[in-house]
Image (spheres, rainbow, N blue to C red):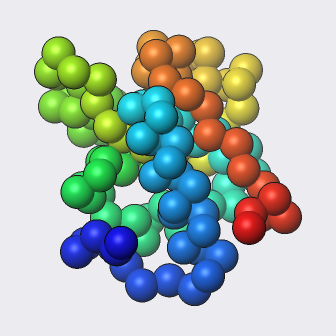
């Protein structure tokens, strides 16, 4: 079933979106470390707020990202969100203000050849 705000994509993008949705369903907080920055354009096409989860992305300012995330993480319940961090590795994330969120959530890993 497709959400009202979900864009119309080709089959590979749809599989990727469905996979992300399943990860958010399982873990609540999903942090996507996109070391080679292959997926920024895809993430930028995701609705920032979906019926299922919120999408936030690092786009050059940790402060802007943390302020955007402030309302998402303010409640008692585990937030349902995807956070995209392009150009970031497990070592890099440890040096950022996103470390606490990363540790509270689940790292998303997916290579294009493994979709399907």
Residue at (53, 35) in percent of width and height: 31
Residue at (61, 24) in percent of width and height: 93
Establish if 116 lies above or below 22. Answer: below
**Residue 65: x percent and y percent?**
34, 37
**Residue 89: x percent and y percent?**
72, 32
**Residue 114: x percent and y percent?**
81, 59
- Residue with the most extreme front position: 1
- Residue with the most extreme right position: 113
**Quadrant in which the N terminus appears:** bottom left
Q: Nearer the viewer, residue 93 or 20?
A: 20
**Residue 81: x percent and y percent?**
36, 40
Residue at (47, 34) in percent of width and height: 26
Q: Is 89 placed left or right of 41 in the picture? A: right
* Residue 101 can be seen, yes or no: yes
Residue at (31, 48) in percent of width and height: 53
* Residue 83 can be seen, yes or no: no
Q: Is 89 placed left or right of 9 in the picture? A: right
Q: Nearer the viewer, residue 52 or 91?
A: 52
Quadrant of the rendered structure where residue 2 is?
bottom left
Establish if 25 lies above or below 19. Answer: above
**Quadrant in which the C terminus appears:** bottom right
Q: Is 28 placed left or right of 18 in the picture? A: left
């Amino acid at each position: 079933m497709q959400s009202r705000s979900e864009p119309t994509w080709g089959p590979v993008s749809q599989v990727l979106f469905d996979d992300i949705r399943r990860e958010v369903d399982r873990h609540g907080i999903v942090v996507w470390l996109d070391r080679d920055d292959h997926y920024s354009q895809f993430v930028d096409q995701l609705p920032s707020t979906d019926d299922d989860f919120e999408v936030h992305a690092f786009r050059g300012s940790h402060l802007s990202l943390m302020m955007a995330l402030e309302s998402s993480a303010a409640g008692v319940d585990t937030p349902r969100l995807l956070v995209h961090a392009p150009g970031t590795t497990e070592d890099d994330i440890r040096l950022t203000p996103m470390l606490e969120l990363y540790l509270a959530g689940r790292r998303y890993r997916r290579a294009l050849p493994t979709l399907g």
